[in-house]
Image (cartoon, rainbow, N blue to C red):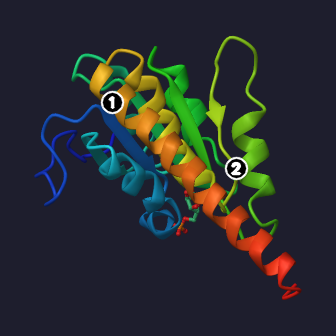
Amino acid sequence: MSETSSLSPAWPPGLTSSPLVGILMGSDSDWPTIQAAAAALDEFGVAYEARVMSAHRTPDLVRDYAATALARGLKLILAAAGGAAHLAGVVASHTTLPVIGIPVPTELMGGLDSLLSMVQMPGDVPVAVVGAGGGGPRNAGLLAVEILALGDEKLQGRLVAFKQELAAKVAAKDAAFQGKLRRGKI
Ligand code: RP5
């Protein structure tokens, strides 16, 4: 069985024709949950493409995408799915690129099903998995940036600045908190 979907559809606006990261999702219904991953990549100026494809509904497309990703210039793949979330594992089985799984929260189990489907890979086929919901999708994007920054000094510099901003925000919160404590406002 083979699907007719092309590997090279017209590039949607805002994305790029020379992406470093492939963001895959099992369904378009996953996008609202995982767009924080794309936003993190945008924040650091990392080019990506985002595609809907399913390990179960379009298995041939997933295989072809994963098997040709390295040759197309991708450096890593983020794969989001919910429930019987096999997308990241199937992608990992067809590529030597690092794969980061993003478990999508579900009605049935809040995403624990998705998380376990992704994280319990057999030995020899690694998939890095972030949390289901919460900061998980954003962390997937940031982890991708960190991996790419290993070979990119400019990106590494931006990450250092990002860490400094985080620390400054926490310091400001602590200062405000100490002030409230002193004034008996807490
Ligand atoms: C998974 O099934 C998808 O990743 C999605 O999280 C879930 C539901 O898909 P739809 O029924 O919304 O297409 O494969």
Q: Residue at x 38, y 26 (%)?
A: 156
Q: Residue at x 36, y 21 (%)?
A: 67
Q: Which mark is residue 117?
A: none
Residue 21 lies in quadrant = top left
Q: Residue at x 75, y 14 (%)?
A: 123
Could you say which is closer to the camera, residue 108 or residue 12? 12
Residue 152 lies in quadrant = top left
Q: Is residue 97 left or right of residue 169?
A: left
Q: Which mark is residue 131?
A: 2
Q: Position of residue 14 (x, y in %)?
A: 17, 58
Question: In whole angstroms, how far apart are the C-alphas of marks 2 and 1?
Answer: 24 Å
How dense is the environment of label 2, judged by Cα within 10 Å: few (below 14), some, or many (20 and up)? many
Earlier residue among tags 2 and 1: 2
In this rendering, the answer to whether 144 lies above or below 44 is above
Could you say which is closer to the camera, residue 58 or residue 95? 95
Q: Which mark is residue 155?
A: 1
For badge 1, the amino acid type reads Leu
For badge 2, the amino acid type reads Gly
In this rendering, the answer to whether 97 lies above or below 184 is above
Mark in front: 2 vs 1: 1
Q: Position of residue 180 (x, y in %)?
A: 79, 80
Does the image show residue 68?
no
Q: Position of residue 145 (x, y in %)?
A: 42, 34
